[in-house]
Each structure stands twice: as C-alpha cells, then as structure tokens.
Image (tube, helix red, strand yellow):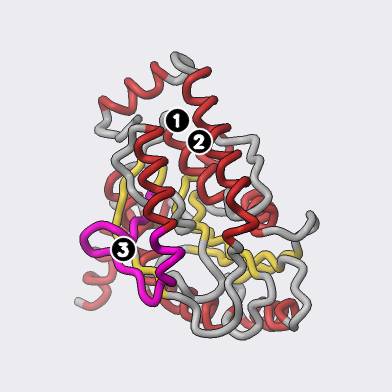
C-alpha cells in the first residue's frame, strides 16, 4: 500500500511538471559571512523537503570577510550547492549576471544572501510557475499576503514613490518592480539580453524587459525581512542615477520597439498572460 501511495504521489508530481524542471537559485554574496551559511542551509532544506530538483549557485562578489571560505565548506557538504567567484568588477548586478550566465536549471530565481527572503516563498514561486504555465513569477511585498518586516521608513517611502512612478510610466498593474526576488524561465533570461546593469538597478531591468518583450507573468505575495546583522549593500545616494538610467532605457525600448512584440503579445494574451 505504501509503495502504491508513493507511486501515485510521484505520478501526480510528474503530471504537474515538477520532475521536468530543475530550479536554480542565484545568490550574490558580498561580505555575507554572518548570514550566508544560514541562508543556504535553510533554503536547501526547504527545497529538499518539497522534493524540488535544484541547485543553489552562490556568487562570491569580491568578499574580504571569509565568505569565500564558508562557501567552499558548503560546496563540500552539499552537492546541490555551487560556488563561483565574480570575475567582473564588484557589484550586485555583475555578480547576478555571472550567475545568470552559469546556472544549469530550467528556471532561475534571484535570492538575497542576507536571509531577507524566505525559502517557503521560493517553493511557492516555483509551484505558481508550473501551475499557471507562465514565463515569470514576480513577488510583491505590497499585496494581500505580502509583508515587510523592519523596513527602514525613509527607504519604504522612496520605494513606494519609485514603484508608483514606474507603474504610471509603463501602465502596469504590478506594484513592486524593484523587488529583487523574482523567478524566470531559462528562455526569458536569454530573451532579455543584453543585460546592462552593474548594480541593484538590475532588479528593475530584468522584469521591465521581460514585460516589454511580451513574456507572461504571475504576481504572488512574498515577505521581506530586514537583515539583523551586517550592513545593507544598497546605497540609495549612489543608486538614484542608475535606476533612472535603466528606467528611461526600458521606456525608450518600449516606445521605439512598438510593433516588434505585438504578435507575441497577442499570442500570450490568448493564453491568459498579462502583457503590457
């Protein structure tokens, strides 16, 4: 009876496409020696419990605090964990780009190394992608079921202003474009090339290009928890002009490429997608 139950369970999972997809998680890590082991271990434990075929690809972004040694130890202990050094100049976007050039899965999520994202949200994103049959899954911390914990108030206000501006400029319903935590199928990553961003503006470039170029997406709530230790890598004063550049770049692409993606969007619309 137990063997029959297991076989039925496996058949159901195969029907849903779980066995046909491998999930990669790219984690950029710059001086995350305090949090990175906790982050990787809890993420791996959750995905293993959910029986999701996965790899956790951590990109060491020129750390100077022992992060690289910790990652080496994790790689020796866990076959599902891979560790690479960022060969480019230091920068969140460049570290993520190196991960996106080297992941092996059918879909890839961008996940923070400071434990601000939750492993259960990764599993929920993956299930949503399979069940909805979409190209991307975007998280929102500002819809029912979403939550932010200890978000610094000045950053929260600025976040909402920037996201509201993006919604108006691009005529979007999605309200958390700057949220780094997103999931993309492999062909989407190929389809949004070339990636220009070197820093945190990558979190805006990828979803805006995916939307502009006609890929389907679902939005699900996720939680964000402010780091308890270490220092935030996002420096608002340094990032303003970079965010503005990439927003304007995508806006220009949207208007100058009008008609280039029309047929693709119409096809996606017939499948129930959410094109712009």
Residue located beneath label 2 in the image: 209
Q: What's the CA distance linking mark 2 and mark 3? A: 36 Å
Q: Quadrant of the N terminus?
A: bottom left
Q: What's the CA distance linking mark 1 and mark 3? A: 37 Å
Task: Name the residue at 23% across, 64% down.
Answer: 145
Label 2: element kind? helix
Report the span colored magenta: 137-157
Label 3: element kind? helix
**Crowdedness near tag 3: few (<14), some (14–19) or many (≥20) residues, C-alpha within 10 Å:** some
Are dots 2 and 1 in contact, CB under 8 Å? yes
Of badges 1 and 3, nearer the viewer stands 1
Residue located beneath label 1 in the image: 212
Give the side of residue 88 with respect to residue 158, left or right. Answer: right
**Crowdedness near tag 1: few (<14), some (14–19) or many (≥20) residues, C-alpha within 10 Å:** many
Task: Name the residue at 42% across, 56% down.
Answer: 159
Give the side of residue 54 with respect to residue 242, left or right. Answer: left
Marker disc for residue 7:
none
């Amino acid at each position: 009876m137990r063997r029959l139950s297991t076989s039925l369970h496996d058949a159901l999972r195969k029907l849903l496409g779980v066995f046909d997809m491998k999930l990669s998680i790219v984690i950029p890590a710059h001086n995350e020696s305090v949090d990175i082991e906790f982050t990787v271990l809890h993420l791996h434990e959750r995905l293993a419990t959910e029986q999701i075929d996965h790899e956790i690809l951590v990109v060491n972004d020129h750390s100077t605090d022992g992060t690289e040694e910790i990652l080496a130890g994790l790689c020796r202990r866990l076959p599902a964990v891979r560790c690479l050094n960022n060969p480019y100049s230091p920068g969140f976007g460049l570290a993520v780009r190196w991960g996106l050039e080297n992941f092996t899965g059918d879909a890839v999520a961008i996940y923070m190394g400071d434990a601000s994202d939750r492993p259960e949200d990764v599993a929920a994103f993956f299930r949503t992608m399979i069940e909805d049959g979409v190209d991307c899954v975007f998280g929102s911390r500002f819809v029912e079921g979403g939550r932010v914990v200890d978000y610094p108030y000045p950053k929260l206000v600025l976040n909402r202003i920037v996201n509201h501006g993006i919604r108006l400029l691009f005529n979007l319903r999605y309200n958390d474009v700057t949220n780094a935590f997103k999931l993309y199928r492999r062909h989407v990553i190929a389809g949004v090339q070339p990636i220009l961003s070197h820093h945190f503006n990558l979190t805006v470039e990828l979803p805006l290009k995916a939307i502009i170029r006609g890929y389907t997406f679902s939005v699900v709530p996720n939680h964000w928890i402010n780091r308890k230790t270490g220092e935030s890598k996002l420096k608002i004063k340094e990032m303003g002009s970079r965010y503005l550049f990439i927003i304007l770049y995508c806006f220009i692409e949207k208007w100058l490429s009008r008609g280039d993606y029309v047929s693709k969007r119409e096809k996606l619309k017939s499948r129930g997608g959410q094109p712009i």
